[in-house]
Image (cartoon, rainbow, N blue to C red):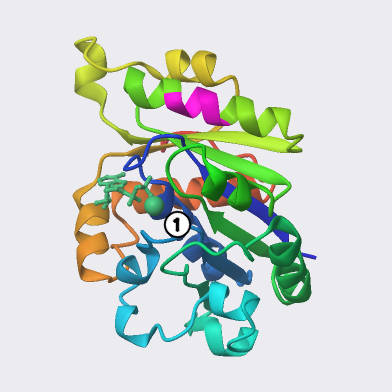
Amino acid sequence: MAERYVFASGKGGVGKSSVALGLARCMNEKGLRVLLADFDIGLRSLDLMLGVTETVVFDWGDVVLGRCSIKDAVINIGNLAFFPAPPEYDEKFTPEALSQLFSALESDFDFIFIDAPAGLGRGFDLACSQAENAVVVTTPDSVCVRSCACAALRLRKSGKEKISLIINRFVEKPVVKHRLLNIDDCIDAVSAKLIGVVPEDRAITESSVTGKQPDKNSPASKAFARISLRMNGERVPLFED
Ligand SMILES: Nc1ncnc2c1ncn2[C@@H]1O[C@H](COP(=O)(O)OP(=O)(O)O)[C@@H](O)[C@H]1O
Ligand SMILES: [Mg+2]
């Protein structure tokens, strides 16, 4: 049975999709099967980040609405299975309908990663309804940390089993100069277990534009690799030695 994780943040643009994709690729490299589902209805982005925009014909909304089969909508990119998000919301996108869909897929995967939209509205609730675990992502600034804390609180109230924190786009220097929050400030504000710190890395920005996988030796890729090991229960230091 797949372990399901929703990637949430409150604020947009903090790196939920980039982190979910980076971790999905690392899991794949270890031979684990991952389904990455874009839940950013109307504002999907993972198809661009994966470089498969031209390949998208159907999405999970079409499956729920009975327009195609699951097989028609899931795009296989190497070992990664990708479920694109629908372009608009439909009243038939209920937690029950989605649960039925993911239950049918569960035995085919080790992990199901659900990439939630920004905000704490119905799209967020729908995404969160499909996972027992959550990863909350924030950048180390007070605006994003506060919204991440709100998202984590909501996830806690909804009874999630595990809520983990990833700090993304971390840069050492401005923290020293007190322009950004430090790691402890972020953990205190969000009150979730820190599982990783991903540095600011141009390789990620470039990869989002080109749709090509970033260099595995880039600082962010190495951080994703360490986080994926921690998610699989291995004891790995937060930072590279
Ligand atoms: N660690 C990082 N270093 C540099 N750029 C990043 C990093 N993480 C994300 N980005 C960039 O930030 C932008 C927003 O990321 P995205 O994953 O779309 O955020 P979200 O899903 O939270 O809206 C993208 O252009 C992405 O390339
Ligand atoms: Mg996103």
Q: Quadrant of the C terminus?
A: top left
Q: Chief secondary structure of the magenta span?
A: helix
Quadrant including the N terminus: bottom right
SS for dot 1: loop
Q: Relative to residue 191, is residue 226 drawn left or right?
A: left
Q: Mark 1: give few (<14), some (14-19) or many (20+) Cα within 10 Å.
A: many
Asked if the beta carbon under badge 1 is closer than 8 A to the nearest atom of ligand 2, the reply is yes
In the picture, residue 106 is in which quadrant?
bottom right
The kind of residue on which mark 1 rests is Asp
x, y percentage for residue 185? 44, 13
Residue at the disc numbered 1: 40
Indicate the position of residue 101 as horizontal and vertical percent values.
71, 72
Q: x%, y% of residue 96? A: 76, 60
Question: Is 172 on the left-hand or right-hand side of 151?
Answer: left
Give the side of residue 211 with respect to residue 127, left or right. left
- Look at 68% across and 59% down and name the residue there: 94
* Residue farthest front in this picture: 91
Whether residue 126 sits left or right of residue 40 in the image: it is right
Q: Nearer the viewer, residue 14 or 222?
A: 14
Q: Residue at x 60, y 35 (%)?
A: 164
Name the residue located 29 percent from the left edge and 53 percent from the top edge. 218
Q: Which residues are magenta?
A: 147-151
The answer to which image quadrant residue 41 occupies is bottom left
